[in-house]
Image (cartoon, rainbow, N blue to C red):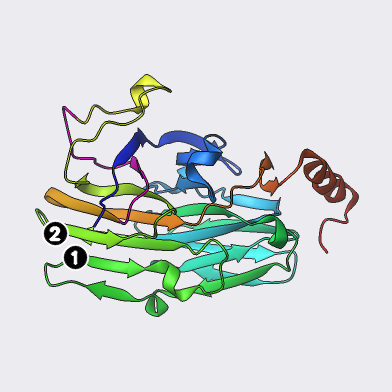
């Protein structure tokens, strides 16, 4: 089996979004080809309500899908089509914006103050950019969980969502200390991992990777082959990803998908194929004709 190699490692960076939500941007608004068909990943874990309670008031989306996965806390959502709902710990909301939707996502502070979760943006191909918007609210009990003989636990988030063009695989993987997990990944698919608990070593060896861009965001694998909290690891092509947990175990997201290899015209929450389509979307939003 051809184990994928590491081609890039970085740390998520603190930023503000929405009405003043403190979060960490794992990737987004850059290196679009590297992450194709994915556009952005945000880590919005917070322990203090004042850091997240203002939430994400009404805003538009077009041309993408947003996948919100909670591990602690609750988020209320509502949209311009009259949909309303709440996602709780372990739940997933998979929203296809398609031709356009205006929605809000408002955190609800739990008694312990913790709001932990992630939001992933996936691009839609040209042929589906203007499809009818839709939601899939997936409760924690509906998400398949696989436990291996060595104690590795895999939540298969993507298994509950069918008919997605990019053929995504979205896993939440927990590995006990010192144990190893090997996961097949379709050849040709983009693949990356985001570590959020413990530490993990990938790919059996200390592979070289791209240092070209920006100094401090990159690690030297010769010094430390284990990657801890807030680490993003991007893999080369291959047939599988291998991961071995450090002394405190590890938990990470493992995400892959089929690249679209299409032009991207992107501004804020709207992603199209051409600048003209982008201008049309914002003009329609200003004119009140955005919702189809």
Residue 91 or residue 62, whichever sits in front: 62
Horizontal placement of 92 versus 82: left or right? left
Residue 13 or residue 192, whichever sits in front: 192
- The residue furthest right is 287
In the picture of the structure, the residue carrying the numbered disc 1 is 152
Q: Is residue 201 visible?
A: yes
In the picture of the structure, the residue carrying the numbered disc 2 is 176
- List x then y, in percent, for residue 239: 32, 56
Label 1 packing within 10 angstroms: few (<14), some (14-19), many (20+): many
Per the image, label 1 sits on a secondary structure element best described as loop
- List x then y, in percent, for residue 81: 74, 69
Label 2 packing within 10 angstroms: few (<14), some (14-19), many (20+): many
Q: Is residue 20 above or below residue 92?
A: above
How many labels, in total? Answer: 2
In reply to whether residue 160 is colored magenta, the answer given is no
- The residue furthest front is 1
Q: Is residue 72 visible?
A: no
Q: Are marks 1 and 2 in contact (CB under 8 Å)?
A: yes
Residue beneath the point at 34% across and 37% down: 7
Q: Earlier in the sequence, mark 1 or mark 2?
A: 1
Residue beneath the point at 52% across and 66% down: 93
Residue 19 or residue 168, whichever sits in front: 168
Q: Quadrant of the N terminus?
A: bottom left
Residue 174 or residue 259, whichever sits in front: 259
Q: Is residue 246 above or below residue 94?
A: above
In reply to whether residue 232 is colored magenta, the answer given is yes
Residue beneath the point at 39% across and 49% down: 45
Residue beneath the point at 22% across and 53% down: 242
Magenta residues (range): 222-239
- List x then y, in percent, for residue 16: 53, 36
The answer to which image quadrant residue 184 occupies is bottom left
């Amino acid at each position: 089996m051809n184990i994928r190699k590491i081609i890039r490692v970085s740390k998520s960076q603190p930023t503000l979004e929405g009405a003043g939500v403190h979060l960490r941007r794992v990737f987004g608004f850059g290196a679009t080809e590297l992450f194709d068909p994915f556009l952005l990943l945000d880590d919005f874990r917070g322990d203090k309500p004042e850091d997240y309670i203002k939430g994400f008031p009404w805003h538009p989306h077009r041309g993408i899908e947003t996948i919100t996965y909670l591990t602690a806390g609750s988020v209320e959502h509502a949209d311009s089509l009259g949909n309303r709902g709440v996602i709780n710990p372990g739940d997933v909301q998979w929203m296809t914006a398609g031709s356009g939707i205006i929605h809000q996502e408002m955190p609800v502070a739990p008694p312990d103050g913790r709001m932990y979760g992630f939001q992933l943006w996936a691009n839609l191909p040209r042929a589906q950019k203007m499809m009818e918007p839709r939601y899939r609210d997936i409760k924690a009990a509906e998400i398949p969980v696989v436990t291996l003989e060595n104690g590795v636990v895999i939540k298969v988030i993507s298994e509950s969502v069918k008919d997605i063009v990019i053929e995504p695989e979205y896993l939440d993987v927990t590995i006990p200390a010192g144990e190893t997990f090997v996961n097949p990944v379709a050849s040709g698919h983009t693949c990356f991992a985001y570590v959020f608990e413990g530490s993990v070593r990938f790919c059996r060896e200390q592979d070289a990777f791209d240092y070209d861009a920006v100094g401090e965001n990159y690690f030297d694998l010769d010094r430390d082959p284990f990657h801890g909290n807030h680490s993003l690891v991007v893999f080369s092509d291959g047939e599988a990803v291998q991961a071995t947990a450090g002394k405190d175990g590890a938990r990470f997201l493992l995400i892959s998908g089929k690249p679209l290899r299409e032009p991207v015209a992107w501004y804020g929450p709207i992603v199209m194929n051409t600048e003209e389509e982008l201008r049309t979307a914002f003009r329609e939003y200003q004119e009140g004709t955005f919702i189809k």
